[in-house]
Image (spheres, rainbow, N blue to C red):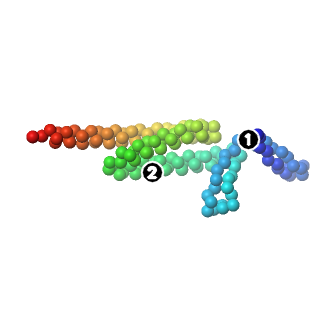
Amino acid sequence: MSKYIVKKSPLKKTNVKCKLGEGYSFSPKVSKYPHLSKVTVYDQNLQKGILNQKIERDYKKIVMRIYELLSEGSDGSSNVLVTYTELDRLRKIFLQKYENKVKKEILAKYLKKLQILELEVKKLMLNLYHTYEMQNDLREKKGKGR
């Protein structure tokens, strides 16, 4: 089913029926706009601007989470796994949801940044694994003593 919008033409003083393309829908914050439940943007330039902001916000969230993990320094193996899963989920969203709606250069830039962050999280996971292995070796040596 196609969606149409009726506009009033200022030149001819008549109504014009325009077929709408694919739009981007979102729900605004309830506290600011309680009477709106859903907003759909059909303008391609506005869609790209909104999606670029959303990608930037999601990227900043994951960077802050990784920074907290790196500065924490304690045994946060579950936090590392959650962050790694979140990175993978975000990468899949970027590839599937925003592939046709955002410029290829912007998407490639953020995917490259996510790949770098993924390598950092993998290093952290590897360090945690080595620490765990060293602790197990120490326990075994203590258990074998006279």
User: Residue at left 45%, top 51%?
Assistant: 64
In the drawing, what numbered circle is on residue 57? Answer: none
Judge by depth and name the residue closer to the eye, 37 or 104.
37
The image shows residue 132 at horizontal and vertical percentages of 28, 41
Kindly state the secondary structure of the residue where label 1 is placed. Answer: loop
Q: Quadrant of residue 105?
A: top right
Q: Can you tell which mark lies on residue 21? A: 1
Dividing the picture into quadrants, the one containing residue 2 is top right
Residue 138 x %, y %: 20, 41
* Cβ–Cβ under 8 Å for marks 1 and 2: no
Amino acid type, label 2: Met
Residue 58: % across, % down: 52, 48
Q: Amino acid at mark 1?
A: Gly
Please indicate, yes or no, whether residue 99 appears anywhere in the rendered image: yes
Q: Looking at the image, tell me whether mark 1 or mark 2 is earlier in sequence order.
A: 1
Q: Residue at label 2?
A: 64
The picture quadrant where one finds residue 17 is top right
Q: Residue furthest left?
A: 146
Callout 1 environment at 10 Å: few (<14), some (14 to 19), or many (20+)? few
Q: Quick one: quadrant of the C terminus?
A: top left
Give the image location of residue 63, x and y in percent. Answer: 46, 48
The quadrant the N terminus occupies is: top right
Which element type, helix, strand or loop, lies under badge 2? helix
Relative to 94, 17 lies left or right: right
Residue positioned 47% across, 47% down in the render:
62
Give the answer, above or below, for where 26 lies relative to 34: above
